[in-house]
């Protein structure tokens, strides 16, 4: 992240095309969509805080629960 000039999600997708935004998190799809890396990206400070690393199944369950909530 420090070496990239990512100012927002669109410029981040130029480097990491699998990045998605699920406010306030930025989600990265890893290893052919088998895993998810949930992060908070601070573009101004070029910092990424990792929230969680999980499988696709765990992420799908988390997403389903949070939508009901």
Image (spheres, rainbow, N blue to C red):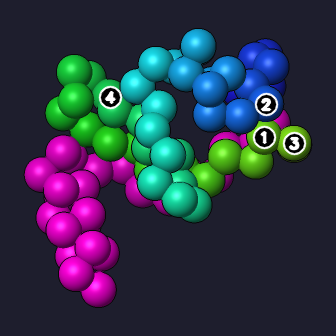
- Whether residue 39 sits left or right of residue 55 in the image: it is right
- How many numbered discs, if any? 4
Q: Marks 1 and 4, Cα distance to the nearest angstrom?
A: 21 Å
- Return the x and y of residue 26 as percentages of the image width and height: 52, 46
Q: Secondary structure at mark 4?
A: strand
Say whether marks 4 and 3 touch (CB < 8 Å). no
Q: Which marked residue is nearer to the observer: mark 1 or mark 4? A: 1
**Sequence order check: which comes first, mark 2 or mark 1?**
2
Residue bearing mark 2: 7
Q: Marks 2 and 1, Cα distance to the nearest angstrom?
A: 6 Å
Q: Nearer the viewer, residue 69 or 39?
A: 69
- Whether residue 34 sits left or right of residue 46 in the image: it is left
- At x 22%, y 81%, the residue is 68
Say whether marks 2 and 1 touch (CB < 8 Å). yes
Residue bearing mark 4: 30
Q: Which disc is residue 44 wearing? A: 3
Q: Which disc is residue 43 wearing? A: 1
């Amino acid at each position: 992240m420090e070496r990239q000039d990512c100012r927002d999600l669109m410029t981040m997708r130029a480097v990491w095309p699998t990045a998605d935004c699920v406010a306030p998190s930025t989600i990265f799809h890893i290893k052919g969509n088998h895993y998810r890396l949930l992060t908070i990206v601070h573009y101004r400070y070029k910092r990424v805080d990792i929230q969680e690393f999980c499988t696709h199944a765990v992420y799908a369950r988390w997403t389903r629960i949070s939508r009901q909530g």
